């Protein structure tokens, strides 16, 4: 079956089934915010939520990860991680699924990253489609990520008293088959889904004042724009924007030596282009000294460079960078300022 239905009263029963199938991560409330956490009590899972503080990226691209153990004398190395556990990401927004697709492109590009790919092979993604804006900061409609565009195993849509579930992979089908409370979707369910999608078209409107193709063209001409100076004056270089972004993938490597100075472990940890020393090279030369140039680089890494290399925008429209910015820098306002300059 391609589509199935699940009554809401049976949701917790299904979550208990998923917990038995693999390690389960899902959104839950934390004070006034939301986070992805391992599911202990299925009653804590929430499906109506503002994008989590950190994207689920932290589970397939950990903030700190062992790469290998090494011994200096005699020199030898061994992989630090020998196996990866099966896990399920449940209730993932379509913007975050788009982020996973971006990471796939990066880490499959040669040389392939074995740790990421091994984790991805163990991962199952169950999405939930947003039917309304999370809040005022999202720009998912302009990026085209307010609707499902693949990259998931199952996608849930809230139809009121039940969910309709799109089955998009063999892995996904195994999680809904042979369960008497999950039924194949009937014609009435498919009609309800169509009405839901039509209603959604009236809710989501493009947040940028120009189409996405024009946004790309503006970035082709705006490297010297005064907009970057204005953004740089606001920026406090906290790095929050890159820490919460679902498509930022820069990392550094560090070696921790034991007291013997012979044995150690190599780690990789997240890094950020917004940090003061990120673009420094040997001899002390810094290619992006100012906060304006660092912010400009971040925007170009979302709207220009990956389009040229991967034919894909690396902004997913989740709104996290704006939501978390200590200086109140707003991504939509910045892009629209560039578009406005183009029309002057």
Image (cartoon, rainbow, N blue to C red):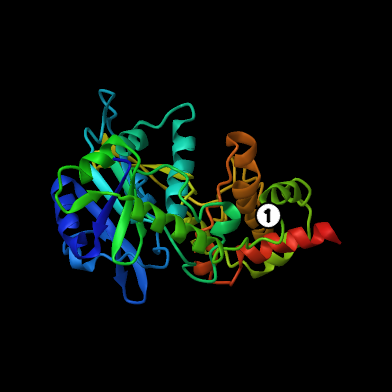
Q: Residue furthest right?
A: 344
Q: Residue at x 44, y 42 (%)?
A: 150
Residues packed near mark 1 inside 10 Å, few (<14), some (14 to 19) or many (20 plus): some
Horizontal arrangement in the rendering, residue 299 relative to residue 169 (left or right): right
Quadrant in which the N terminus is drawn: top left
Task: Look at the picture and state if 313 lies above or below 115.
Answer: below
Viewer-closest of 88 and 304: 88
Rendered residue at 49%/49% (across/down): 248
Q: Considering depth in this image, is 71 or 129 the residue closer to the camera?
A: 129
Whether residue 333 can be seen here: yes
Indicate the position of residue 288 as horizontal and vertical percent values. 66, 51
Question: Quarter-wise, where is residue 163 in the image?
Answer: bottom left
Place of residue 45 in the rendered image (x, y in percent of width and height, measured from the top left)? 25, 64
Q: Which residue is mark 1?
A: 293
Which x, y percent locates residue 265? 29, 39
Quadrant for residue 100, please give it: top left
Residue 85 visible in the shown view = no
Q: Residue at x 40, y 32 (%)?
A: 113
Please tell me which residue is depicted at 49% across the width and 71% down the height of the picture: 135
């Amino acid at each position: 079956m391609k589509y199935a239905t699940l009554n809401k009263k049976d949701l917790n029963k299904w979550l208990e089934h998923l917990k038995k199938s693999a390690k389960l991560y899902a959104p839950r409330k934390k004070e006034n915010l939301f986070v992805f956490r391992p599911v202990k009590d299925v009653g804590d899972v929430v499906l109506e939520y503002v994008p989590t503080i950190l994207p689920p990226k932290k589970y397939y691209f950990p903030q700190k990860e062992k790469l290998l153990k090494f011994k200096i004398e005699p020199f030898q190395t061994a992989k630090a991680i020998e196996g990866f556990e099966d896990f399920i990401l449940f209730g993932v927004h379509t913007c975050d699924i788009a982020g996973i697709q971006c990471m796939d492109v990066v880490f499959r590009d040669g040389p392939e990253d074995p740790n990421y790919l091994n984790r991805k092979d163990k991962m199952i993604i169950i999405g939930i489609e947003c039917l309304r804006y999370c809040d005022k900061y999202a720009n998912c409609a302009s990026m085209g990520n307010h609707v499902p565009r693949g990259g998931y195993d199952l996608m849930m849509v809230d139809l009121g008293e039940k969910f309709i579930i799109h089955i998009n992979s063999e892995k996904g089908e195994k999680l809904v088959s042979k369960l008497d409370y999950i039924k194949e979707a009937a014609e009435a369910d498919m009609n309800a889904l169509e009405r839901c999608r039509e209603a959604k078209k009236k809710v989501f409107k493009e947040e940028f004042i120009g189409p996405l193709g024009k946004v790309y063209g503006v970035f082709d001409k705006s490297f010297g724009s005064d907009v970057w100076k204005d953004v740089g004056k606001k920026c406090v270089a906290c790095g929050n924007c890159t820490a919460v972004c679902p498509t930022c993938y820069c990392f550094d490597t560090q070696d921790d030596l034991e007291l013997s100075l012979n044995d150690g472990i190599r780690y990789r940890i997240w890094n950020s282009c917004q940090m003061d020393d990120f673009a420094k090279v040997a001899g002390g030369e810094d290619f992006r000294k100012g906060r304006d140039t660092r912010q400009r680089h971040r925007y170009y890494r979302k709207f220009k460079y990956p389009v040229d290399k991967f034919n894909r925008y690396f902004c997913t429209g989740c709104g996290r960078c704006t939501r978390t910015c200590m200086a109140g820098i707003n991504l939509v306002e910045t892009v629209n300022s560039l578009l406005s300059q183009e029309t002057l």
